[in-house]
Amino acid sequence: MRVMRTDSRARRISPVALVMALLALVALTPVLRAGAQDATPAATVTPYEAPENVGDLEGSIEVDGSSTVAPITEAVAEDFQEVAPNVQVSVGVSGTGGGFERFCNGETDIADASRPIEDEEAALCAENGVEYYRFEVAFDGITIVVNKNNTALTCISVESLADLWTEGSDVTTFADLGEGLPDEEISLYGPGPDSGTFDFFNEVILGDDVAPRTDYTPSEDDNVLVEGVSGDENALAYFGYAYFTENQDQLNAVAVATESDLSNCVTPSLETIANGTYQPLSRPIYIYVKAESLTRPEVQEFLRFYIANTGTLSEDVGYVAAPAAVYAGAQEKLEGAISGTVEPDSAATATPES
């Protein structure tokens, strides 16, 4: 915004004129801010350009980890197959924790992760000499779901979620969650302990010092949870937003309120996840890439394709794309990782004890 010079000679301004000028400035502030933002060049993602020899690439790429991130990686792998038909990409869903265990033992090239790597996992990677880079791929909103025929529970507070999922909870029926709800026993389904969704949910809902209940049906595969809830009218579960959108004909999403009186219920959607109003269950999701694997041409091209297209593909499968600046920065980081000019992210995390 251009700054105008003021005349050094003092002038008398009437109080009315001064007030009017101030009101005008206040009214113009949003416009001026918008103009200033528009004047800043927007980061752009460089479209993927396949090299001439991409069809000659061969090999296999092993991915494992979060079932939340898996739909994105699977979509990328499917489209990459058309570009490099001789490269086979295998995508497993052992959960974020299970994926990191395999990754840090050197068994996989890429770990899908719905949370950042934990200190113990980073230490295992360091112990085994596995260096890695982390890339943010999208945003997710953990979604509370019930059976399609359950139209009674439309909103639940964070406090009630904590009461429901705490170890030793005396919440057993929907009626225990609030007045007017049916006196029917709740069948709980949820991610298993190897899931990053399990870790994130417990951290933001229960807190660090509260143990979660174990008397529920667990699975690291969200498809299993979807099947369980869709077949049980008294079921309740939580998992990644994309699995809800894919199965809306069988499930209802329950809005979440941070106030116990349910005065600020927010339903998960692409809009509420993107603008941050769906709290506290919105989160970024990631992939971790083994530095050694980036020396292989087929892995390099797969990652170039992944980052260039993940914004579009993440939205196609029901997630929220990260800002373009995130992907543009990831492209720059990837090229530095390939050339060896960017230090692995693992260098800033845990190292084995001496």
Image (tube, helix red, strand yellow):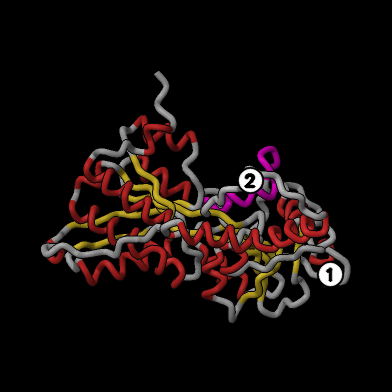
Real-space Cα separation, disc 2 to disc 1, in angstroms = 29 Å
Q: Quick one: 111 or 225, which is closer to the camera?
A: 111
Of the residues shown, which amino acid type is indicated by label 2? Glu
Could one spot residue 250 in this view of the protein?
yes
Name the image quarter holding the C terminus.
top left
The quadrant in which residue 140 appears is bottom right
The residue wearing badge 1 is 183
Q: Is residue 29 left or right of residue 130?
A: right
Give residue 68's mark: none
Q: Quick one: 25 or 126, which is closer to the camera?
A: 25
The residue wearing badge 2 is 203
> Callout 2: helix, strand or loop?
helix
* Foreground: disc 2 or disc 1: 2
Q: Quick one: 81 or 212, which is closer to the camera?
A: 81
The residue lying at 38 percent from left, 63 percent from top is 310
Q: Is residue 16 left or right of residue 75?
A: right
The kind of secondary structure the magenta stretch mainly shows is helix
Q: In the image as oriented, which residue stretches furthest toward the right?
A: 179
First reached walking from the N terminus: tag 2 or tag 1: 1
Magenta segment, which residues?
195-211
Q: In the image as oriented, which residue stretches furthest toward the top?
A: 354
Disc 2, disc 1: CB below 8 Å? no
